[in-house]
Image: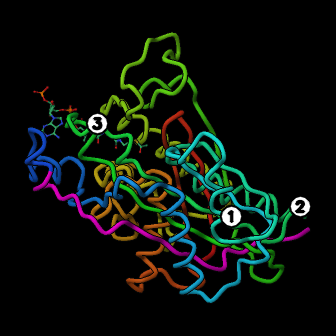
Amino acid sequence: QSKARITAIGSYVPERILSNADLERMVDTSDEWIVQRTGIRERRIAPPDVFTSDLCVKAVQNMVEQFQVSIADVDMILVATTTPDFPFPSVACLVQERLGIPSAGALDISAACAGFVYALNLANGLITSGLHRKVLVIGGETLSKVTDYSDRTTCILFGDGAGAALVEKDEHQPSFLHSVSGSDGRAGIHLYRTGISDRLNGVCLSGEGNIVQNGREVFKLAVSTLNREIPKLMQEAGMSLDELDWFVPHSANIRIIQAVCERIGFPMEKTLFSAEYYGNTSSATIPLALHLGLREGKLKKGNTVLLHGFGGGFVHSASLITW
Ligand code: ACO
C-alpha cells in the first residue's frame, strides 16, 4: 500500500488590515469587547477585484518559492472554500489554469471551516489507494465578500486568506497517523449562507448571500464537538494528549480554543492559531496557523500534530500527523 507525506506548505494574506479600531468606526463595538470575546485584533481584507482563486494562486506560489518544490506533475488539485469565485468553474480549475499545471484533476470541496482538513484526509486517501501520486491541497477564502459590515455580531470575526500544502507519495516517512471526519446536518441552521434556496431544516432563511450565525449555539456546538471527538480520536490512535507537540484547531476564535483546551485538559501554549491577526478565515485558518508556527520556529520536523477543523454544516474533520 502507498503512503503519503506533506512535503511543503505556503500561505498568503491580502495587504489591507481591518483593525478593531476600524470596526469601532463602522459598527457599535469596541476593541475591548472584540478582544475579550474572540481574541481577534486584526483581519486582512482583499480588494474588490481580488477573489479566492487569486489568493489561492499566491499561497501556492509562496509554497513553491519557500520549499523549492515542483508542481508541474501535480495530478490532483483540491480546493476547500466556501467563497468560490463562481459556483462553476471551480476554484480548483481556475488555479490549474493560472498555475499552468497540465491536466491535473481539479475539484472544490464544500466543508466550510473543516474543508482544509477534509481535503488533506482525502489527499491521503487518494495517494494511499494508489489513484494519485501528488495532490495540491488549498484552503482559501474571501469571506469579506459575504460579510454584512452592518452586522456587529459577524463582521468582527471574518477575514480573507489562503494556505496551500503539497501531499506526495512517500513510503519512508508518511505524515498521516489517524483521521476522523463526521457531520450533523441537524445543526445546519445555526450557521449558513443562502444560495439558490432560502429554506433550511424547514426554516425560512435571511441574510441574502451573507453569513448568518447564532453565535452562542455555534460556540456551544464547537466546544462540545471537540470535547467529544478529540479524546476519542487520540484513544483510537493509541496515543495520549501528552504525546502531542501541537494542537491546531480551526481558528474560529481564540475563546473557543481556550474553552476546548480547558475541557480536554490540554495546555493552551501548545496550540497554534491564526485568528489573532487574521481573524476567522474559515478553510484557511489551519494552514495559516501551521505556516505561522513554522515561521516562528515552533513547529519542527518530527513533531506530532493534531489538526481539527469544524464548521457550518455542521461538519468536523481531524487529522493526526507527523510533521
Ligand atoms: N460589539 C459589542 N457588543 C456586541 C457585539 C459586538 N461586536 N456583538 C454582539 N454584542 C452584544 C449583543 O448584542 C449582546 O447584547 P445584549 O446582551 O444587550 O443583547 C451582548 O453583546 C452579548 O451577546 P452574545 O451574542 O450573547 O455574546 P457572546 O458572549 O456569545 O459572544 C460571539 C458573541 C463572539 C459571536 C460568540 O458567541 C462566539 O464566539 N460564537 C462563536 C461564533 C464563531 O466563532 N463563529 C465563527 C464561525 S463558526 C466557525 O468558524 C465554525
| Mark 3: amino acid | Asp
Q: Earlier in the sequence, mark 1 or mark 2?
A: 1
Residue in the picture at 49% in, 55% down: 52
Callout 2 secondary element:
loop
Image disc number at residue 131: 2
Q: Quadrant of the C terminus?
A: bottom right
Q: Amino acid at mark 2?
A: Leu
Residue density around tag 1, few if under 14, some if 14–19, many if 20 or more, within 10 Å: few
Q: Position of residue 252 (x, y in %)?
A: 37, 50
Q: Which residue is mark 1?
A: 97
- Looking at the rendering, the stretch of residues picked out in magenta corresponds to 1-22
Q: From the top left corner, tell me how far across and down residue 277 is, in percent.
A: 28, 65
**Front-lying residue, 34 or 103:** 103
Q: Residue at x 55, y 68 (%)?
A: 57
With respect to residue 194, does 285 lie above or below? below
Judging from the image, what secondary structure is the residue with disc 1 in? helix
